[in-house]
């Protein structure tokens, strides 16, 4: 090994990094993620820590300075202290903290740090954090929306850092010699000209957004509308009915306690129409008329299949009905019934010159085409299209205003534009226009007919709650001129508050490039987050925003916006519909493209520093059936396989793996999700030319010798069971990849898929071995659970299994963990467990301990679980946590989602439980007593 090991190849303060990354999810205004929506954006704290640890040497690389392990560990703790401060959100722009980090980087690089390059920059997190650490940042992406977002983060702000705003209001207020830190001046101008756009838009289209008359019970008078709530409609197919039937998933308006409100649909036979009446107080609305199974006519009760609704939509016969109006009242939201004047005003909107671009025939996460929505403009109401075209066109008008004011403020009028590298008045006007166009995109996210009403929060939901555009039956149409969620001023606020936080003076550079193309003529530290096989169709999704950006910014960025829509053909995504439905061709395309990208990265990678690759594709998938479908118990994923194949073929070896969790530890309890929450950061080096060959037997021997210790360390770090199989890939593939090839018995190279399957087998064997070291009653319970779950089975089967595990059914029944009656046996469910005293139970099993811990956590939270863990004792509590991994694996394989979630929650919460155990242990014993 001719290189110095970096800190990331040896140790990291994972808990601190993960806690800071999770906390970022609750940061709203000012966080770069709020500049513009991007899917699967990496947390800033994670990126910052990974880059720092990639640059800084591990103490073991300097035996002259740190000769003993104790010396090395002491130095690591010092470096950990820097990282722990560095990742905190409060320290994002703390120059004292950043200066310490930069000093360590300069020391490790002989005052000559290489630049950082991210060839799949997406939302720009990695290059932004490189820049924050004082490093030259280069980034590229094929997707023009990603390129523009990253330019707005790392390329534009440094060019105008320290400049005063040019708007007349700010110039009147600026005192002599007043300085402007970072991009604060630019932020102030974006805010000012955004407000100018609002005033101009109100003059042009304000008449389309009338105020609503309030009923006497709400004080009378008029109020500004927050949203109009509409339901799509089709004619009932029942010939005896034929009424216009509303399609609504719900009729609730507000589910807030004490502020309940709903729409009551009234079937009015006199006029053969459904009327909508707003009601408040006690009571509840009827069920919605649309579910996953289809729809039901509210007039005659006829079930209506989705095929019929799709046919009506494709024939252009889908209509809309106004159900309610939400207004800004004196004491909160006011819900008002439909108003015919408001309906006619909405219908009077006549959009001009709207983008006439096609939605893809098929795309990941798109369903609306089946209902006749074939163009991007179909995703918006006419009034929404008027608003978006008006605000988009006002971007150019605002740019001209900025330019004139910049010249008047004394900024150089050199004629150079932003896209040409200029920094004068014209370039500055381009910069402000760029951010205003991003605000228009924020508006588009809230101003489409794919938005819904959040009944518990009483606010607008945006279009992209996830990376998909599903059909929305009862949609909310936002008022841009209100003061509530989704209004224009709020869209501008999101943008300028991000700019205000960007203070770097180090120039960054962003290119629109295929990841196989870069040839910058220098070596760089490469850190990247490549696409996830077929998880997200970035190009198809980002067209939603691209059409508005192109309208507003084509004159400023003619190269970026040279195509009518986002380039699709070269996008690295394994979507069969782009290959005539052929999954093999889609896989081959993705594998070839990603392999070529990794080969380019190897050519560019600086030899002194490792490559870091983020990957978050969940392991389990199928080789047949629906696209993206999953089955429990499968052994490998095509996404992981192709990514790893690409790395290995490009000549990389994995030298480290780190699970980076970016979700709050209590997230599973909060919303019932069991989704993967970790990204695996793979640390890679070029494989030595003299790497050895290995046989299958030699690889398996190494796997069985080395993987258990790595898995033990993952468990000690409380890696969530839901992430365990994914995390095991890292250390397993580190063993596999250090060989030039692993040869099968017939002399053929072992494919990555086979290696992944063997790694999974060893993981299962490891967890089973842990179970084997537990008490015999626990081994019985785990085996019974694996076979029958919480269901009943014949007594005879229980007797045979009990004898095999060296226990007895009677004993298990007397211990309160098994129920036997009428020749049937089953495990006692958690909510049926009797009270117990672990201190006085001579035969306390790990099974009972695990179940009681889960019960305490779910019913009483981390405090209750920590008190019980103290009473169980450290060793028994740790065994219970280990069992939770095994039980989770069984549940996932069998598809028992709720039960799996319970065990996952216990492990994810374990660090917090341990911390509370320490706190409680320091208190008098009487304070920690808990009755169970």
Image: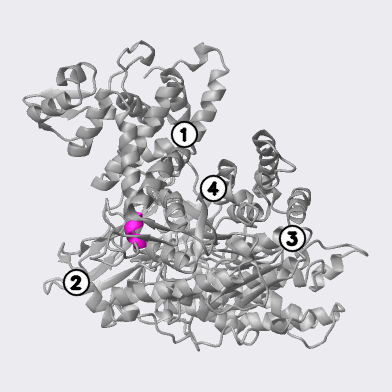
Q: Which residues are magenta?
A: 751-756
- 523 displayed left or right of 375: right
Can you identify the residue that label 3 sits on? 134
The local secondary structure at tag 4 comes to helix
Quarter of image, res 854: top left
CA neighbours of label 4 inside 10 A, class few (<14), some (14 to 19), many (20+) = many
Foreground label between 3 and 1: 3
Instruction: Establish if 78 lies above or below 611.
Output: above
- 765 displayed left or right of 664: left
Q: Position of residue 310 (x, y in %)?
A: 25, 75
Residue located 55% across and 88% down the image? 562
- Mark 4 and mark 1: Cα distance apart in space: 16 Å
The local secondary structure at tag 2 comes to loop
Q: Is residue 661 magenta?
A: no
Q: Position of residue 496 (x, y in %)?
A: 67, 65
Can you identify the residue that label 1 sits on? 910
The residue closer to the viewer here, 801 or 891, is: 801
Residue 497: which numbered mark, if any? none
């Amino acid at each position: 090994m001719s290189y110095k090991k970096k800190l990331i190849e040896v140790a990291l303060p994972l808990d601190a990094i993960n806690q800071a990354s999770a906390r970022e999810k609750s940061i709203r205004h000012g966080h770069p993620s709020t500049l513009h929506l991007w899917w699967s954006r990496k947390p800033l704290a994670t990126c910052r820590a990974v880059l720092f640890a990639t640059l800084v040497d591990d103490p073991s690389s300097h035996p002259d300075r740190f000769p003993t392990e104790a010396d090395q560990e002491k130095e690591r703790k010092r470096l950990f202290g820097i990282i722990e401060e560095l990742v905190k959100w409060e320290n994002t722009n703390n120059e004292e903290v950043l200066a310490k980090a930069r000093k360590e980087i300069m020391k490790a690089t002989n005052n000559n740090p290489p630049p950082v390059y991210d060839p799949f920059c997406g939302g720009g997190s990695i290059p932004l954090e490189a820049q924050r650490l004082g490093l030259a940042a280069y980034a590229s992406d094929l997707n023009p929306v990603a390129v523009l977002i990253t330019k707005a983060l790392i390329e534009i702000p440094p060019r105008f850092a320290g400049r005063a705003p040019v708007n007349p209001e700010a110039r009147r207020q600026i005192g002599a010699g007043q300085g402007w830190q970072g991009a604060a001046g630019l932020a102030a101008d974006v805010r000012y000209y955004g407000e100018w756009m609002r005033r101009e838009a109100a003059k042009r289209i304000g008449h389309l957004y009338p105020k609503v008359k309030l009923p006497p019970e709400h004080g009378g008078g008029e109020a500004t509308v927050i949203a109009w709530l509409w339901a799509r409609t089709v004619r009932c197919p029942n010939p005896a009915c034929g009424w216009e039937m509303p399609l609504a998933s719900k009729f609730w308006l507000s589910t807030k306690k004490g502020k309940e409100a709903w729409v009551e649909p009234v079937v009015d036979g006199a006029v053969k129409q459904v009327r909508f009446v707003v009601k408040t107080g006690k009571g509840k609305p009827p069920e919605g008329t649309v579910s996953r199974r289809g729809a039901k006519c509210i007039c005659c009760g006829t079930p209506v299949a989705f095929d019929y609704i799709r046919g009506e939509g494709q024939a252009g016969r889908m209509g809309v009905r106004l159900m309610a109006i939400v207004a800004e009242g004196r004491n909160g939201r006011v819900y008002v019934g439909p108003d015919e004047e408001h309906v006619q005003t909405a219908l009077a909107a006549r959009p001009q010159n709207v983008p006439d671009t096609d939605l893809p025939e098929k795309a990941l996460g798109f369903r609306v085409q089946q209902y006749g929505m074939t163009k991007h403009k179909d995703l918006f109401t006419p009034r929404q299209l008027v608003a978006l075209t008006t605000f988009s066109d006002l971007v150019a008008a605002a740019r001209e205003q900025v330019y004139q004011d910049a010249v008047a403020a004394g900024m150089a009028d050199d004629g150079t534009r932003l896209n040409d590298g200029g920094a004068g008045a014209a370039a500055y006007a381009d910069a402000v226009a760029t951010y205003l166009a991003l605000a228009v995109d924020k508006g588009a996210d809230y101003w489409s007919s794919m938005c819904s009403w959040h009944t518990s929060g009483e606010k607008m939901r945006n279009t992209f709650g996830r990376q998909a555009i599903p059909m929305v039956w009862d949609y909310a149409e936002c008022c841009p001129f209100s003061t509530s969620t989704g209004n224009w001023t709020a869209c501008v606020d999101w943008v300028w508050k991000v700019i205000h936080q960007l203070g770097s003076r180090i120039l960054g550079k962003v290119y629109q490039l295929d990841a196989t193309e870069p040839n910058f003529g220098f070596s760089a530290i490469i850190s990247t987050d490549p696409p996830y096989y077929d998880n997200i169709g970035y190009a198809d999704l980002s067209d939603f925003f691209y059409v508005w950006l192109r309208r507003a910014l084509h004159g400023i960025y003619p190269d970026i916006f040279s195509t009518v829509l986002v380039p699709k053909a070269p996008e690295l995504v394994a979507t069969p519909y782009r290959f005539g439905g052929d999954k093999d061709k889609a896989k081959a395309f993705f594998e070839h493209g990603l392999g070529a990208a990794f080969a380019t990265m190897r050519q560019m990678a600086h030899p002194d520093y490792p490559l870091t690759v983020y990957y978050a594709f969940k392991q389990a998938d199928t080789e047949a059936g629906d696209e993206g479908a999953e089955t429990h118990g499968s052994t490998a994923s095509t996404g992981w396989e192709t990514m790893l194949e690409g790395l290995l073929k490009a000549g990389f070896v994995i030298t480290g793996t780190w699970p980076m969790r970016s979700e709050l530890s209590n997230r599973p309890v909060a919303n019932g999700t069991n989704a993967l929450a970790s990204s695996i950061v793979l640390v890679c080096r070029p494989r030595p030319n003299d790497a050895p060959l290995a046989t299958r037997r030699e690889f398996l021997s190494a796997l069985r010798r080395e993987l258990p210790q790595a898995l033990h360390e993952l468990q000690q770090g409380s890696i969530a069971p839901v992430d365990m199989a994914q995390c095991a890939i890292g250390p397993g593939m580190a063993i596999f990849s250090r060989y030039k090839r692993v040869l099968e018995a017939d002399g053929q190279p072992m494919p990555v898929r086979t290696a992944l399957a063997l790694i999974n087998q060893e993981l299962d064997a490891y967890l089973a071995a842990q179970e084997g070291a537990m008490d015999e009653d626990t081994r019985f319970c785990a085996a019974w659970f694996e076979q029958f779950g919480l269901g009943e089975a014949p007594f005879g089967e229980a007797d045979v299994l009990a004898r095999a595990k060296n226990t007895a059914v009677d004993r298990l029944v007397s211990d309160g963990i098994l129920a036997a009656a009428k020749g049937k046996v089953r495990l006692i469910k958690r909510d049926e467990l009797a009270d117990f005293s672990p201190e006085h139970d001579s035969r306390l099993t790990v099974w009972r301990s695990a179940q009681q811990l889960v019960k305490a956590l779910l019913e009483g939270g981390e405090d209750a679980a920590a008190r019980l863990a103290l009473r169980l004792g450290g060793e028994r509590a740790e065994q219970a946590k280990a069992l939770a991994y095994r039980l989770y694996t069984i549940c996932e394989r069998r598809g028992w989602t709720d039960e799996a979630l319970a065990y996952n929650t216990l492990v994810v919460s374990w660090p917090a439980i341990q911390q509370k155990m320490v706190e409680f242990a320091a208190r008098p014993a009487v304070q920690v007593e808990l009755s169970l």
